[in-house]
Image (spheres, helix red, strand yellow):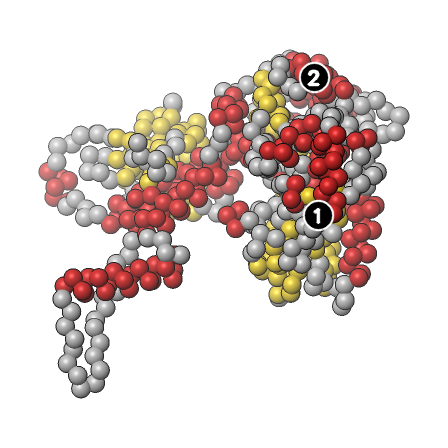
Amino acid sequence: MDSSPKLICPEVPCIVQVQPAKNPGSKGRIIKNAKINLGRNQFRDVILLITSQNSEVCSFTLNAVKVHKNFIHEGKATILLINESLMISNAPPRSLQLFVKTLTFKVALQAKKTPIASRCRLLATKLNLTEEISPLTSKDIAALSNKVGTETTPTRKKGQPLKQLNTQENCNRIEAIKKRRLEMNNGGMSPQSQARASLKRFLSPHQLTEEQKNVLTIVLSGKSIFFTGSAGTGKSYLLRRIVGSLPPDATFVTASTGIAACHIDGTTLHSFAGIGSGKATLEQCLELARRPTLIKQWKSVKHLIIDEVSMVDGDFFEKLEVVARKTRDTDLPFGGIQLILCGDFLQLPPVVRRGETRRYAFQTAAWENSVSKIVELKQVHRQADKEFIKILSQIRSGRCSSESAARLKSTAKQTIEKDGIIPTILCTHTDDVEHINMRSLDKLPGTPTVFKAVDSDPYLTKQLDQLTSVPSTLCLKIGSQIMLMKNLDISRGLVNGARGVIVGFEKGGIIVNFACGVKENIFRERYVVKCSNTLVTRTQLPIRLAWAFSIHKSQGMTLDCVEVTLGRAFEAGQAYVALSRAKSLNSLRVLDFSTECVRADAVVLAFYRDIFQDFY
């Protein structure tokens, strides 16, 4: 059985606007509820097919093609043909990305083949035969990458005859030269191996485990779902896949906190809802939600994604459900919106004021009436150390054996510093974080270099501090311990949470040695968030100082080296979140561990045990 990677071209639901090339100003023909696919006609030409319930099948031969894909992450692309341009919108971004990649390679492969003569085409029997396009394989990519080496001629010394090489010697010599070139350029990989690795790299981020596929299948069936799991089971990763599989125009991506929203390129649930903090009366919340822009937004929602739903207050969740029904003029639960909820109620709980009673979203009638499926992800991806996974499993449920406690305490003296990178101290209180970072920066020699964020609206700086993961002002020196706050290059380890130390400054940027062994120039990145129903941007270096970091801000992240101090732990789930940020016991140092800091909310434990029969 062939186990080499293959990319099967998906059928992509979308809106297509077909515009004549000779009249670019015209509106052209708009095909709603369309589906696009690739196929081949009787002459083996690659063709693009558009099907729709309300119109005939349209087909376009893809000979000379140019694709604009700057907004592919928004589900948009433009395909320029000789006589038409096809503007695609509201497509599931991931499906569109796979479609465009297949199209690009298949058309390039077609261009390498000898075309069928026009006369043969005219004389051929007219048959409207169409067949599906074959999957894209590493062999296809290798065919485009396999360039013929430059021919090498034997040399001779002045005054001496040219040395004659027999055919076999000549072939061997040329092959040896080709091999050396490959070793220099591709690490010794042949074009076929390089292509296979390239396709595998592209496909591997898109591979899901069986339990993750199950969740995606439920989502695509239209059912409302809550999926949970311990830290490191791939909840955020799966959520991004879900976002990429749904039409953008009707999908709203939210999270309970600004940091969590930033991780999934969404907005906060409070900002989306438009009812402020939700502390006002229901009547006042409804009044706020009835503003024209919000009514329009609520009516356009088909899929509402809420990450870290475990931190959403139950009263707010209940008001949200009423607002959804009233603004959409329907009595269906949550106004008929599909809910896609993600989080772990055994991690950080909703923040409540002193004296207030905590109420989780799952304790409400709104949850009971709206959520039809609950799934637990069990496969841990972050940690491979079975001993550590077992310890974390205990702590998640509020337990800690004497053996586990002793093992955690034994990490207090281990050295986890490496190449000038020291572990990030995870703190329970933000005032401790600020104090440690500023004190450590002051100890470094020299004057700090200041990087100020460029905000599209300076009046929204405070809101952008809450909605993005990067600060408005960064004061940095050589030797500053930093953390990367954005995925820049996953294959090289430059991911959200990667630790590093600044070793130099570049014009407009910094030079960082990362714990993963990569030395990289880091420049400003653009963050786009929704604030008060308006898109605003912040352009800043994608880093934060990382001598210390708050446990709350670290939720959802994987850290290279961590030092945990739990002496002031005050919240259920806090110890678990802090400890589970580490990849292994070897990258973790626990300074003041006590079993007293290990706590899990009894209400949450009862909820999980009720729905998951094998839960602890």
Look at label 2 and name its amino acid.
Phe
Q: CA distance from mark 2 to mark 1?
A: 38 Å
Mark 2 surroundings: few (<14), some (14-19) or many (≥20) residues within 10 A: few
SS class, disc 1? loop
Q: Is residue 550 visible?
A: no
Residue at horizontal 73%, vertical 28%? 401
Residue at position x 52%, y 50% in the image? 492
Identify the disc placed on residue 431: none
Q: Is residue 495 visible?
A: yes
Quarter residue 46 falls in: top left
The quadrant of the image that shows the C terminus is top right
The residue labelled by disc 2 is: 607
Left or right relative to 214: residue 444: right
User: Which image quarter is the N terminus in?
Assistant: top left
Pick whichever, 362 or 4, lies toward us: 4
Q: Position of residue 253 (x, y in %)?
A: 61, 33
Check disc 1 and report the residue beneath it: 414
The disc labelled 1 sits on which kind of residue? Gln
